[in-house]
Amino acid sequence: MEANIITEAEFKELHFQGAPKVITEIPGPKSRVILEKQELLDANVVSYPLTYTFALEAAKGATLMDVDGNVYIDFSAGVSVCNVGFQNPDVLEVVKKQADKIIHTLDIPTKARIDILEALSKIAPGSMKGNSKIIFGGPSGSDAVEAAIKLAKVNKKGYRIVTFEGGYHGQTSGSLAATAKKSYKENYLPLIPGIVHAPYPYCYRCPFGKEADACDMECLRYIEHLFRDPYSGLVQPAGMIVEPIQGESGILIPPKEFIQGIAKLCKENDVLFVCDEVQAGFGRTGTYWWSCEHFDVTPDAITMAKSLGGIGIPIAGMMYKKEFDEAWGPGGHMGTFRGNVLGCAAGAAAIKYTEEKQLLKWSAELGDYALKLLKDLQDEVNCIGEVRGKGLFLGIEFVEDKNTKKPAEDLLKKLVAKCLKRGVIVWKGGHWINVARLIPALTITKELLDKGLEIFSDVVKELDKTI
Ligand SMILES: Cc1ncc(COP(=O)(O)O)c(C=O)c1O
């Protein structure tokens, strides 16, 4: 791929120069002191510092600096939160100006709130454009999913919600019930009732045991059967919530026919069709604003958070078709921070920036380029079972053996630790935590991406010899 010179040069300034730069052992001495203090006082539930063993000093674009002066190339963007890059200067300036004026406004209107409402309406997917309403409740993606469950219940018959295996939707009672990972839930049961998990096309490990060339879209056929057969046990659901491309479960991209099929089922059966765009939205998957757009479907509602706040200001919401707004009135879904004005300002500025700098195109181009390099790497080694991706939403699934496909969780752990020591932050995911996720800021330069991928590939080749 030829780098787009204008964009490459312009984006270069957004990051710490000279990354990666590792000048101490990791964790360095200053990080150690802070990590020890955190361990004393912070809750046992703290988890990221167990893997990413440093204390942060600053961040810029797709790079992070720890308190010892080590600089990392960051392939996580704060888990897809900073699509426009950490501390994006254009967005930061708008946030600072807003902070000087007013920070807490409930849902009383401000210019920033109108800016984000208008900006989101313009980028609504498909037939939602010009026909949407937006709600802000609490500031997390989990809360946006709670809002979607309520919207389904208030508009449709029944209360059941169909979700999918591999799905991640959050940690509050409703969103956690919708989440598929058993270990997140088992200590907290019962959660909300009526959640049904349907199979999702994890084609590398087909839930129906099929090879790709023998696939008859069994996942879709099964859900069709649930709706059709009077004895299937599925009583009329109010809603269906799907990640059109799954993030936490290892960047799983279903066939177009699957997403189109479930959208059609929802329509035919009067079920609210919700796409969870919390992780995959805002240009992450390239070409489009929303991952559902790759499948030519318009959902009834989309949930959003993470990059909605531009540079990490916590704000979440849901955009949905106007017709579903009539069923609830004032207080139908609430939260003290219902659309924090800093988040509104940041979100509107980030959307403007994404448009001006053509980040949807950049994400698609760089994503295609990285996907090819990673597929070449897959051909060279035994430990990569599959490489998947759309835009800068990339997953590399590690196995102990390409024939048995035994998940290689330990190998991924070592890989992440070794990359960290060389100044590259690689994210983890997957059903068995054996999938490396590469989800950098969309403003990453080709040069930084190349450097990061070179280190990643070196470490993969080194570890490949050990299996
Ligand atoms: C698809 C999806 N939905 C919902 C959530 C929950 O968001 P939050 O962690 O902000 O509550 C996440 C978080 O990773 C997510 O990836």
Image (spheres, grey):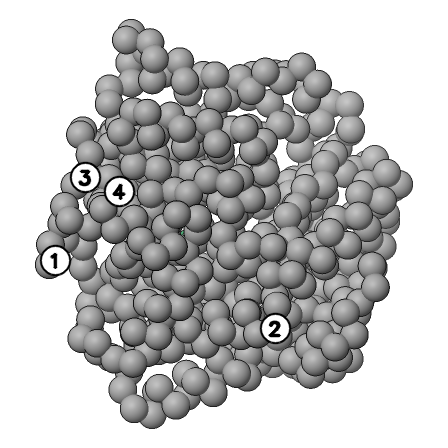
Disc 4 element:
helix
- Tell which circle, 3 or 2, labels the residue nearer the N-terminal end: 3
- Left or right of 439? Residue 375 is right
The amino acid sitting under disc 2 is Lys
What residue is disc 4 on? 149
The answer to whether marks 4 and 1 mark residues whose Cβ atoms lie closer than 8 Å is no
Residue sitting nearer the eye, 147 or 426: 147
What residue is disc 2 on? 357
- Tell which circle, 3 or 4, labels the residue nearer the N-terminal end: 4
What residue is disc 1 on? 331
The answer to whether marks 3 and 1 mark residues whose Cβ atoms lie closer than 8 Å is no
The CA span between labels 1 and 2 is 38 Å
- Which of label 1 and label 2 is nearer to you? 2
What residue is disc 3 on? 155
Rendered location of residue 5, percent (x, y): 79, 74
Q: Quadrant of residue 334?
A: bottom left
The amino acid sitting under disc 3 is Asn
Residue sitting nearer the eye, 286 or 188: 286
The CA span between labels 4 and 1 is 15 Å
Mark 2 Cα-neighbour bin, 10 Å: few <14, some 14–19, many ≥20: some
The CA span between labels 2 and 4 is 35 Å
The amino acid sitting under disc 1 is Gly
